[in-house]
Amino acid sequence: TWTMVNIVDEQVERIREQVGDARVICALSGGVDSSVAAALVQRAIGDQLTCVFVDHGLLRKDEAAQVERDYVAATDVNLKVVDAADQFLGHLAGVTDPEEKRKIIGREFIRTFEAAEIEILQTPGTPVRFLVQGTLYPDVVESGGGEGAANIKSHHNVGGLPEDLQFSLIEPLRTLFKDEVRQVGEQLGLPPAMVWRHPFPGPGLAIRIVGAVDAERLRIVREADAIAREELTAAGLDRDVWQFPVVLLGDVRSVGVQGDGRTYGHPIVLRPVSSEDAMTADWSRLPFELLERISTRITNEVPEVNRVVLDVTSKPPGTIEWE
Ligand code: XMP
């Protein structure tokens, strides 16, 4: 729409004025907000922007490729990819407590991002003075509206920012709501799969495995999640659901039967919810035929899973995620 064209043009102008010939860095998560914010800044200042994508190995199927391939193709952004999967898995080994998982992931994320940042600072060129943040209007309001207010809500930016932040913030989405951000994303030609992505927690699949996280469990939950998402999309219901966590109960086993053999596998929990803002949520009444297709495919295609259950708890009392 014409208003979105205006927002893009207006922001591009503002960013150029704010930045001058300085360089800018941005942490890309693959989520909607950082992707759109970075694309706007790229549109404004091109190569002066460098994005860092820390692949912590806890993303869903194809998400890393989406950033590295499709996003770069769509935006021409200067991207530095850090493959840190082994490092994150190493630190997570044997950890079962949800908050401990979050702490480790937040800490490692900052470490990894800072190392990448130092490399960028050392490359020759004009000084790096700015950091892009995908702060939206509701974040500004929720945290009191001050400059840099987004930093208060560490929940939404993996672990928050380093405390001795030496950059000024560029927050081109500060006046926008999520649906407007999506329209800007479409306007900028971002891949629809990114623009319409459901919210996904920074700690990723690590908090969708109840129990310790390892490569094998990640593979199981990743496959199950891919099937659920594929079927939801095929049913045309993506935009009717706020989020659709798929959770692996890593330490639970139950008896089943398959072919002519007894199985002793893990349950997968389907947690589709509808919500306006994630503060409260209701369990989504997905069509039984869709749930059946998802269940059949998961148990057929993921041999370690022999049972699929549906979470019918609202928030409150349940949270959206299981951890
Ligand atoms: P809960 O589970 O608390 O989740 O109902 C509310 C919303 O927040 C997301 N979530 C997180 N996002 N880091 C994040 O970036 C986290 O540690 C985290 N934990 C939950 C969740 O996916 C939902 O959208």
Image: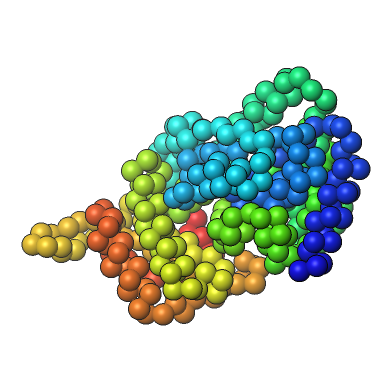
Residue occupying the far left of the picture:
260
Horizontally, residue 135 falls left or right of residue 303, namely: right
Foreground residue, 233 or 116? 233
Residue 262 in the image, given as x and y percentages of width and height: 13, 59
Residue 52 in the image, given as x and y percentages of width and height: 64, 36
Residue 149 visible at all: no
Total labels: the figure holds: 0
> Which colour assignment does the render follow?
rainbow
The residue positioned 54% from the left and 43% from the top of the image is 69
Residue 276 in the image, given as x and y percentages of width and height: 65, 72
**Could you tell me which quadrant the N terminus lies in?**
bottom right
Horizontally, residue 34 falls left or right of residue 230, namely: right
The quarter of the displayed image where residue 49 is located? top right
Foreground residue, 146 or 235? 235
Residue occupying the far right of the picture:
17
The quarter of the displayed image where residue 8 is located? bottom right
The residue positioned 56% from the left and 47% from the top of the image is 70
Residue 26 in the image, given as x and y percentages of width and height: 71, 40
Residue 211 visible at all: yes
The residue positioned 66% from the left and 68% from the top of the image is 277
| 75 lies above or below 280 | above
The residue positioned 11% from the left and 62% from the top of the image is 259
Foreground residue, 218 or 239? 239
